[in-house]
Image: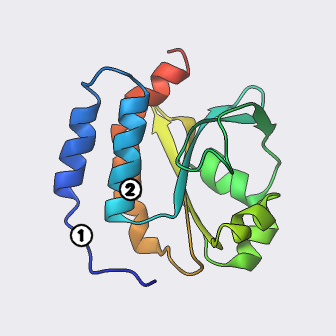
Amino acid sequence: MSKQAPIDPLPHIKVLAASVRLPDQPMATFRALDAAMDAVIGHTYITVLLYHAELREIERFYSSNLEAYPLAGRKDVPESDWTEKLLTRQECFIGYDANDMKKYFFDHQLIHSLGCDAILNVPVVYDGVTLGTINLVHEEGWYEEGDTEIALTLASIAVPAFLQIAGQ
């Protein structure tokens, strides 16, 4: 599989923005976010995680692959360059290949078994606070720096859904 020509993100931005007004929140927003991220950037699967900064834990609230990544439980966030970049500096992290995946993700073997060796982690930030992450996973070499600006834009539209699950 190879990347297609760039897609006009505006129609997908409009659909995602409209999803915030729908009932069944936050899932309506997360489903629209999944569709928009897939159409504009691409992914084999996507997960949405809430960040509990005070506990240094993340919690999965949405997954397009519930068999491999069910909605349950929390996991600790280890100190790493990944944590610093994504959660502290609030910048996207790109894992380009299997070596990057092995370095930062304990579940790299599961990710590889799903045909994926690349990841784009997108911080979701509101009022200077990291609320969570959106994680796009695809085949090796899929993501590039040029994907980060639109990913951050789409993530920002989903802020109300993150605030809801954070109880704010």
The answer to whether any part of residue 91 appears in the image is no
Secondary structure category for the residue under label 2: helix
Res 96 → quadrant: bottom right
At 26% from the left and 25% from the top, the residue drawn is: 22
In this view, the residue in front, 37 or 67, is: 67
Q: CA distance from mark 2 to mark 1?
A: 11 Å
Q: Position of residue 64 (x, y in %)?
A: 52, 48
Q: Which residue is mark 1?
A: 7
Q: Residue furthest top?
A: 167
- Residue 53 as seen in the image, left or right of residue 167: right
At 35% from the left and 51% from the top, the residue drawn is: 35
Secondary structure category for the residue under label 1: loop
- Residue 29 as seen in the image, left or right of residue 105: left
Q: Position of residue 78 (x, y in %)?
A: 82, 47
Q: Residue furthest front?
A: 67
Which colour style is shown? rainbow
At 79% from the left and 58% from the top, the residue drawn is: 107
Q: Position of residue 9 (x, y in %)?
A: 23, 60
- Residue 61 as seen in the image, left or right of residue 157: right
In this view, the residue in front, 20 or 147, is: 20
Up/down of 66 relative to 143, above or below: above
Pointer 2 local density, CA inside 10 Å: few below 14, some 14–19, many at least 20: many
In this view, the residue in front, 75 or 149, is: 75
